[in-house]
Every structure is written in structure tokens, then in C-alpha cells.
Image: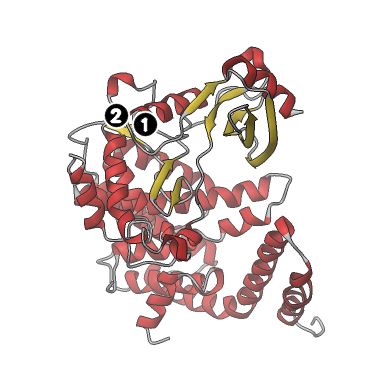
Amino acid sequence: MIEQELSRCVAAWCPGATGVTGAAKLSGGASQETWSFDIMHPAGPIGAILRRAPQGFGAAPGRAAGLEAEATLMQLAYDAGLPSPRVLHVLKPEEGLGRGFVMARVEGETIARKILRDEEFVKVRPLLARQLGKVAAGIHGLPRAKLPALREMNAATEIAQLEHEYRSFDWPRPVFELALRWLAAHDPGPPPEVTLVHGDFRHGNLIIGADGVRAVLDWEIAHLGDPMEDLGWICVNSWRFGEIDKPVGGFGAREELFAGYAEAGRRADPARVKFFEVMGTLRWGVMCCGMMQRFRTSPDHSMERAMIGRRASETEIDLLRLLASRGD
Amino acid sequence: MQDEPTPIELTKAVADFLRNEITPVIKGHSAFKLRVAINILDLVTRQLTLAEGSDDAEAARLAGLLGRSGSLFELNQELAERIANGEVDLATPGLAVHLWQTTLAKLAVDQPNYASYKREVGRDGG
């Protein structure tokens, strides 16, 4: 049935399209879905992705930038020559598909364990830390004047938000308390330059091929803030998938990330990056605790959510390694 | 007194059955969920095996640090408060050791294959 709606929709903006086929839901939360499908066309099929909030779901909650903003950011990134899918169409209310957009499907891998272990990526792996630095610099360099409306965050507002969320769980975690104290004491203050921050620049949101980064996805929590936040987040140990001596997503050293960043004309601030690595580690820990809450309160009793709840302790050991180190 | 087999033996028996006899005949998304289910049972088995000893040791350390007794939840709540208001920090004798030991005990149950855990346990000669 979604194929019929998509066919009608596609006919309006894709000249020559004769319909769609192979629609498959890739992921679906309560308020957001991702579908893959092919547009049938005399010149050959066009791979496409639909990202939408089904009808009945209004504005996205809390931290989300909104699907229209996501579409604008992806297109800006594409136009700037960054690895990003081309946006094909932004949904209109009369199309009956809800809110969201259609983008070109980019082939490649997003699963960290495959990217970090499979033979296919053996040549590109050592290059990726530097390449990610370049991509991040490109994102941070997108012109402010062209950006959609986004909330602005700084270290202090982010600490307050994390603390609020952690306290709402009402479950004592001395290591999280220690991290909150450390963050408050080491708040680097406003950044020299406020830029676009992707907000979730890490494995899972990067499509990678044998030739390197092909696309940055999921601009859902993009905001304005300190660009060092993105560099700190990608160094969080949770995204190293066992390669703990290679801080940048299990690929390489921070210095390589910073070198790529510099190559693209921007300077990294290692002290700020470390601050945001600590904050990011705590953030993932708080998110794990949130999963435990959702497991307990939502009717589907998801085993995956339950187990993610039990991963908060991973961030506690990583926080101790950062703040009370016993050696590398 | 409840009879035998113990909860540890029962949970382990179910996990082994699912692992050895059901895993080979299940495919697709159900296979993924089965793996999660087995991981949960393994975690429960580890907790049933280890938690009593590690909880006692944690309570003893907390009593020493805080100078009072109470339930593990109450003691952790008080330690959390004292860290939050700055009364206790990493310069406080015993705090770092306590947090390390408590966290290692959690990881031993939650995720003994986590690379950071293996590195830190190796440091202790474990």
C-alpha cells in the first residue's frame, strides 16, 4: 500500500518514473520510519530512501531538529561536496505520506563490526580517521546563513540537560556524579566560533565503502554549538567496538582526525575535544539508562532495550578510564 | 529452603539448550533475537553467581567510606549525594579504589567481554 502512495508521489517530481517497487521498511520507531524502495524508470531503476514521520505524528520530540531541517542540511552538505545523499523530494501534506523526505540511496556499509573487521575495508581503514576529520570540518564550515532554524547548545546547557535526565531515573550512580562534577569544573566556556554541529557523528550514521566515507546520515539532533562536540563524540569508546587503542571510531589516532580537520582548513582544540569525549561517554551512559526506562514502561518488553540498559556500566568503566586512569 | 536444582543451574540449562539445540535451526530476525535472549540468560547466570559476594564487598567499602550502615541503595544514594555536593572526590582516600572495584564487579556481570574491562582486569592480574 505504501508503494501506491509512493508511486503517486514520485510521478509528480520524477519525470519518466513509471512507479515504485521493492518497498521495504528498514527501521521504524514510534514516530519515525525509514523505507528503502526503487523508482522504476526507463533509464534504469533509481534507488531511493524514504524517511518520514507517519501521519498523526506532529513535531518531533525534544532534541530533534525536524525532518524538514534534516532534508535541508543533507542537501546543503551534498551541494558543498560532502559525502551526503542527494535529497530528491520533500514530502507535501497532500501526498498523504506524512512528513519527511525522499533521498537517493547510497550503497555501502553502516555496521561497525563489519567495517572494522571485514577484508573489504582493509585498505581504507587506516585512512578513515583523517578522512572523518575532513568531513567534520566540511560540516562545520557550512554557511550559517543557509542553515535552517536549529536550537543552540553550549557545554553548560548540555551538562544541565544530562544532569536533569540522569536525576529523573532516580537510580544512584556515583561514577556519573563524578563525571558531572568533572564536566562542571572543566566547562571550556563558549567556543571561539559557533557552528553547525551534526550531533551524532559516529558509526551507524556513516555509510562506508571500500573507497571511504560515502555518506553522513541522520541529522536528527543537529544543532548550533561547539564544533569540537562532534570530534569528541566520535572518540567515545563506545564507538570503537573493541579497538580501544584507536580512539577515532576504532580507525586511528586523534592526531589523524585533527590532521584531516586541519587539512580542510579548521583547527581542532584537543582540550575541548577531551571535554566532549567525557561528556559524550556520559551521554551514551544516560541514553542506556533511558533504554532501561523505556523497556520497563513500554508494552513491547523489548529484550534489546533491556540489554542496552545493562550497558550503562560500560560507560562507567570508560569514565573511570578517562577521569581516574590507572594507565592506558 | 527451596529445593534443588538452584536458579543458577536452571538458568544455565535453558541457556545451553537454546544455544546448542535451537540456534542451529533458527534464521533471520528471530535468530538475532534468540542471541539477545541467550545473552540475557547468561547475564542472569553471572549475576546469580557473582552478585552476592560483590554486593557484600561493596557494602563493606561503602560503610567504611561513609561511616554508616544501610541498604546498598541507600549507601549508594548517599555516596552519590556527597560526590554531587563536593564533600567527597577523587582525593578522598579510598574513593577511587571503591569506584574501580564496584565498576569492575558490574562489568563482570554485564559485559565481561567489553575491551576496557578486559584491559583493566588484566592490569589487576585477573
From the viewer's perspective, is A299 left or right of A220?
right
From the viewer's perspective, tell me whether residue B56 is left or right of residue B123: right
Q: Residue at x 71, y 62 (%)?
A: B31
* Picture colour scheme: secondary structure
Residue A185 relative to residue B20: left or right = left
Spot occupied by residue A325 in the image (x, y as percentages of width and height): 29, 69
| Residue pictured at 66% horizontal, 66% vertical | B40
Q: CA distance from mark 1 to mark 2?
A: 7 Å
Image mark count? 2
**Residues at marks 1 and 2 touching, judged by CB atoms closer than 8 Å:** yes
Residue pushed farthest top?
A: A94
Mark carried by residue A77? 1
Mark 1 secondary-structure assignment? helix
Which corner quadrant of the image does residue A161 belong to?
A: top left
Circle 2 Cα neighbour tier, 10 Å, few/some/many (<14 / 14–19 / ≥20): some
Q: Is residue A103 above or below residue A323?
A: above
- Of the two numbered discs 1 and 2 on the same chain, state the one appearing first in sequence: 1
Question: Which chain is mark 2 on?
Answer: A
Q: Find numbered disc 2 in the image and state the secondary structure of the residue it sits on.
A: loop
Judging depth in this view, the residue of A256 and B105 nearest the camera is: A256
Front in this rendered view, residue A21 or A89: A21
Q: Which residue is at 35% across, 65% downward?
A: A320
Please state the horizontal and vertical placement of residue A313, each as a whole percent of the image: 48, 63
Up the image or down, B79 lies above or below B100; here it is above
| Location of mark 2 (residue) | A142
Q: Is residue A173 above or below residue B51?
A: above
Q: Which mark is residue A20?
A: none
Going by the numbered disc 2, the residue's amino acid type is Leu
